Image (tube, rainbow, N blue to C red):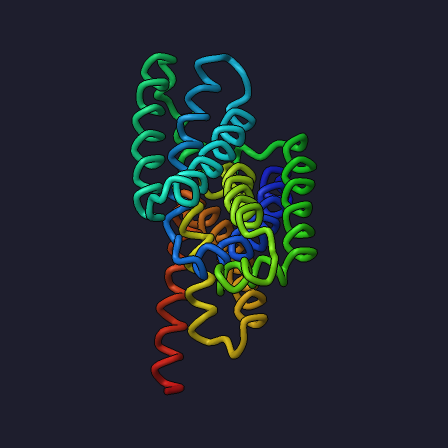
Amino acid sequence: MLDLEFMRLAFAAGAIVGVLAPTVGFFLVQREMNLIGDGIGHVAFAGVAAGYLLGVSPVWTALGAAILGALGIEWLRARRGAAGDQALAIVFYTGIAGGVVLISAAGALNANLFAYLFGSILTVSPSDLPIIAGLGLGALLLVAVLLRSLVAVSLDEEGARVAGLPVSALNALVSVLAALTIGVSMRIVGILLIAALMVLPVIAASRIAWSMRSTILLGMGIGLGSVLAGITIAYYADLPPGGTTVLVAAATVLAAECWSVLRG
């Protein structure tokens, strides 16, 4: 399997995605915004469609649309008094409707589109890997530097505000990191499935972890293992890598639940 260049590229990119997605997902789970990835993913779908319509790389248009969608969700939630689920619903339905219209206008309902939506190990090129690595490692470094502040805002937003932390900016940063994760991950997992990889490893980790730090680290380990196992199974069983990866992550949640019950 590793004699093939596209598989080596897929594993390298998948390793970055597997670590980054649960790291960002931890803060979404703590804020009880588990579905924000779905909302941003549907806006990214509109970005992919815009890329086909304009004749430019769908990766960059999807990333730009995802960041705008993430900022829009946070603005609606924080500045207009809309609840988190209401803000998600507005962006969710607008994104999917816009994507359908743009795809129809571009006449791009083909196999290439489905590779972005559900992931394809064949779409990672040698020129893509440095970009994925740079964006992914940059996001992880940013989280490491701001970890204490991000955790404070996620666990107790009002307490963080009283302590003088820039709560609005940190919330916006988490949303932008979620958008960046979706843009980086669309080649491996797909923009419609990456939200699951952001949330499921964190849920599994929370069932067996003994502290907040262990939850983050276990989530990263489970996410990495899910991606690598998913790609391997997909290769030998001729299955879609995105769906296989998410199913592996879901299986870890079930296993963690069983372990938690037995331990209890």
Q: Nearer the viewer, residue 7 or 150?
A: 150
Say above or below: 222 vs 227. Answer: below
Where in the figure is residue 29, as x and y percent of width and height? Answer: 43, 59
Residue 221, picture quadrant: bottom right
Q: Is residue 257 left or right of residue 217?
A: left
Query: Can residue 207 be seen by looking at this rendering?
Result: yes
Q: Residue at x 35, y 77 (%)?
A: 258
Q: Which of the pair 90/64 is nearer the observer?
A: 90
Residue 193 appears in view: no
Side of 78 where 212 appears, left or right: right
Q: Quadrant of residue 91?
A: top left
- Name the side, left or right, on which 192 lies relative to 127: left
Residue 190 image point, x, y percent: 44, 39
Q: Quadrant location of the C terminus?
A: bottom left
- Residue positioned 43% across, 45% down in the render: 78
Residue at image location 55% in from the left, 21% down from the top: 57
Tell me residue 53's x, y (percent). Answer: 44, 14
> What's the residue at 62%, 32% (across, down)?
125
Near-viewer residue (99 or 129): 99
Q: Is residue 86 above or below residue 264?
A: above
x then y, percent, for residue 101: 31, 19
Q: Within the image, what quadrant is residue 60 found in?
A: top right
